[in-house]
Amino acid sequence: MWNFSLFPDQASTIAKHVDALYFFELGIAGFFTAMICVLILAFAARYRRKSTVDRSNPPPSSKTLEIIWIGGPLLLGLTMFTWGAILFYKMYDPPADALEVYVVGKQWMWHAQHSEGRAEINELHVPLGRPIKLTMTSQDVIHSFFIPAFRMKQDVLPGRYTTMWFEPAKIGRYHLFCAEYCGTNHSAMGGWVYVMEPVEFQQWLSQAGTGASMAEQGERLFVQYHCAGCHRGSQTVHAPRLEGVYGRPVPVQQGKEVRFTLADYRYIRDSILRPKSEVVAGYEPVMPSFEGQITEPDLLKIIAYIKSIGAKEATQ
Amino acid sequence: MSAVAVEFKEDYLQAYRLKSWLLTTDHKRIGLLYMASITFFFFVGGAAATIMRLELMTPKGDVLSSPDAYNRLFTIHGVVMIFFFLIPSIPAVLGNFLIPLMIGARDLAFPILNLLSWYILMIGGSIAIGVLIFGGVDTGWTFYTPFSTMFSNTMVVPAATAVFITGFSSILTGLNFIVTIHTMRAPGMTWFRLPLFVWALYATSLIMVLGTPVLAIAVALVAVERLLHVGIFDPALGGDPILFQHLFWFYSHPAVYIMVLPGMGVVAEIVPCFSRRPIFGYKLIAFSSVAIAVLGFLVWGHHMFVSGQSMYAGMIFSFLSFMVAIPSAIKVFNWTATMYKGSIRLDTPMLYALGFIGLFTMGGLTGLMLASVGIDVHVHDTYLVVAHFHYIMVGGAVMAYLGGIHFWWPKLSGRMYSELLGKLSALTVFIGFNLTFFPQFVLGYLGMPRRYYEYPAEFQVLNVLSTAGASILAVGYVLPLAYLLFSLRWPPDAGPNPWRASGLEWQTDSPPPVHNFEEIPIVTRGPYQYSPEGAEAIDGNGDDASR
Amino acid sequence: METVTTHRASGPPASPHDEPILEEQFDDLEQQHEASSVGMWVFLATEVMFFGGLIAAYTVYRATSPREFALASQHLNVGLGCLNTVILLGSSLSMALAVRAAQLQRRRNLLWCLAITAALGICFLGVKAVEYYQEYREHLIPGLNFQIPAQVVAKSTRLPLDPRRFEMFFVLYFFMTGLHAFHLIVGIALVSVMALLTWRRWLSGSGETQIEVTGLYWHFVDVVWVFLYPLLYLIDVQS
């Protein structure tokens, strides 16, 4: 308990700029609070009921004072706004050569995938001195990816991608938190960000063995789990081809009616894990469930593969 | 226009039958009904906060049986404190009681509607207490989608219903105030002779009337989505979760001005009285109240800087948020300047008012940190936000409410309270409050997120300090409940004007007669007719009235 | 005390009881009248914000899914909607005439105008019920029996169409017209009660203030429909 800190690490390039503005504003807050408190205490003491100081001609109002104390705060406000806005603009605009990482938040864990292939849960390894751009989404509710030491935070939304970027500036291990209330284990939905020397990072990246990208790994899994057996033109089983499916509406049978649903991350994941919940119209519900057989990271890779063939022409 | 004389009647407290209270249309009694209700709700919300702070003394979750219990607690704390305590507090208690008296009228424009407002609050409140008892709701008072519509397993629709219903209480009260202030001022009471409390409540009423309906639609749509499983806000069904945030915050930001503007009005009444000086810059303060109400409707997006809304929208909302701070700054300077060359006595109401000024200033200035987009990215959804709004709501609004209750207590009850206990409570609240919430600024910048029931060990010291402060703060709140109720044992002999205050409410008896004035006064002067000279002569009366 | 003959259309108050009663809180009748009027205007302002919230949601979804909304709008009955618009505008006319009659203390005239207003309001509800029933038959009620119509399914294979936004139109349609219908029912009840009280001579004076304030509310409900009709029915009338 006694090992406590009062200020976060400055572990990204933007951190010291954020802190600079923060200290400026803290100074202003402190100055005006102190000024008002001092004035109040001074007036309360000097002009207390029993004192006999000069109270003649108290001004009922004063144009000069009003102009000063409207103009002053206005100028300070404009300064703070402009400084903050410029900072914000810098925070929003990732450099073109940023390393890309894909993050998925779900109740109640973070899944990060480096495009070179390595994936991690509730952890993020990044190299020092390179800008990193995170492309993020949620699989269920709104979460928020927050690294205090980097002074960066971005909400992750279901059904949408949001991005954020940073450039790590200090080696170390830093907290990762979910910062948007998301249900039971919101407090536990966090982990660690590891900033490593670039050489060590490269080693770490290739440690998992495969050098394949997410989509390539996904295709391998697609074959490994026998998805290709039905979905790549089988003679015996009538199953929909998956080229051109990702991102388009799919007709789904519901009793006697046909409903349309969008073939997105959620749909593909549900089709793999609960295939009978949404059967494509015109097909029999014969697909087996893979619940408990495929890990989350592998699911993401498979979806990445299906996504990669989504750009092709529909073959049906 | 002639003044209407009314036969003198007994004072408004005299009838004791329950029916005379539950079916009253007297604005003064309705004010007291509200006082009882919101006191109850305050302690419900406070109990939730107490348990939360106990849990937060240790980094692990060991007080409560599950995270779900904590999530339900912070939700009920927010819902009850905001909708059932803060929003009604000063308007429905002090506003109802004082507005007709301050403008020289016999009642509000629509007395039956006024009673209906109270019943609507009680119905909404009963549903909320029902939700609390029968399992709770765990969405946070902000009901963000799609968690609230598609994922929460708690009583979301009943909670949304409670909020929906209670909104009408607010709307009808605001409507009543606007009409009353516009049409029922006594002869000679021009707009610029109105007490600033009335100006503040007028501005508050504008917000209540225009903002609350949008919240009603937002929660109604949440209920529709949850009940019918149609995609209004859930992306999986084609909806947009950010739309909910826009609809919600369009009301909920102006709502915070509903909570703080009346407090500013109370301060504007207390400071001149205990400085024996007219308020400095009357017109500017009056216009600032309206400016805050208007500008307050334009800044809601500052709750959504990292939500996924566009960067340019973020910058516009940031700019407007800085603008809305200016009228508040004007008020703080004007109140302080009022004390210059005054003759100051630090009675209990004045202690609360001065506490408001200091703490509201701190809270407001930390708001500027949140308005700066570049900083907000870091501190959004952390304890910095929690500290900021508690400085304004508790250090500001609650202290102003207590100050107002103490200031007008002799008027509404005819009795005075123990000045020693009053001062002691004010000091206890001030110390307890700062100890509770100042460490939270540090925690927030360190990165401790909101709504966390477990946290990293290095945050513990600050959390322990905060809990210690909360225990002191609790004492500070229980004491007034005790000694104010206790003061009712004494006979009502405080006299019509123990503070020698100016204002029409002090020209009639304490407690006031049922019809407020024997004869409607004709107003020939502005408010705050105070002068420091001869202030010593007042002390004779003032001291006699206190115990 | 019946002193009115069937031919009496206007004139000075027949007895002292025909003066409006002054409520205790008011100083004089003029203040009372002004308070009622300002009160109703403030209430209407809150209603504008209430419907405004829904219209804002509608605007956002229509802006992001114009094709789906246009297609969905074609499944509404433009003819019946137009009929309803005419009915409601007519009822506003009869309501305005009722207010005039109250001001001129023409009791018989007032009763007829109020009755016509209420009747037209009920006609509107009747037409709306027919429309809702039609939509029920066509499986267009979300949460109940919603199903994308066959011709839309056919279209959707050729054009990119989000069926969820198609359904969203109907969610908003039913919520907005339902909320409007609710306000109309309240209005009809109010007009009917006013007619009854006028008939029973229960209203003090000629009930001028009360009728005027009822009129304001009625006109508001009409204006809301004038906005809803083009927004919901007239998105893409040509196709």
Image (tube, coloured by chain):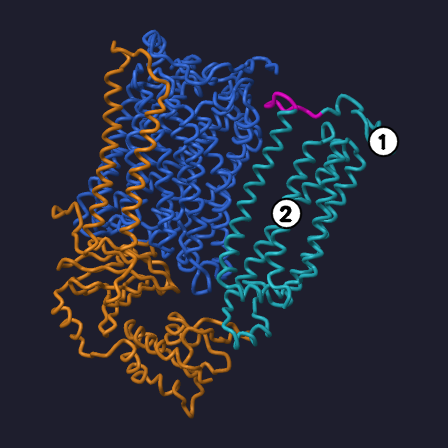
Give the letter of the blue chain.
B
| Residue hosting label 2 | C223
Residue B515 located left or right of residue A263: right
Residue B343 is at least partly visible in this image: yes
What quarter of the picture does the C terminus of chain B occupy? top left
Q: Amino acid at mark 2?
A: Val
Which image quadrant is residue A195 in? bottom left
Q: Residue at coordinates 59% horizontally, 33% vertically from top-left?
A: C38
Residue C35 located left or right of residue C112: left
Give the letter of the orange chain.
A
Please tell me which residue lies in front, C33 or B129.
C33
Residue numbers of the magenta segment:
C20-29
| Residue hosting label 1 | C8
Q: Position of residue A116 (x, y in %)?
A: 23, 74
Residue A218 located left or right of residue A315: left
Residues at circles 1 and 2 in contact by the CB criterion of under 8 Å? no
Q: Position of residue C165 (x, y in %)?
A: 51, 64
Dot 1 or dot 2: first in sequence order is: 1
Q: Secondary structure at mark 1?
A: loop
Q: Secondary structure at mark 2?
A: helix
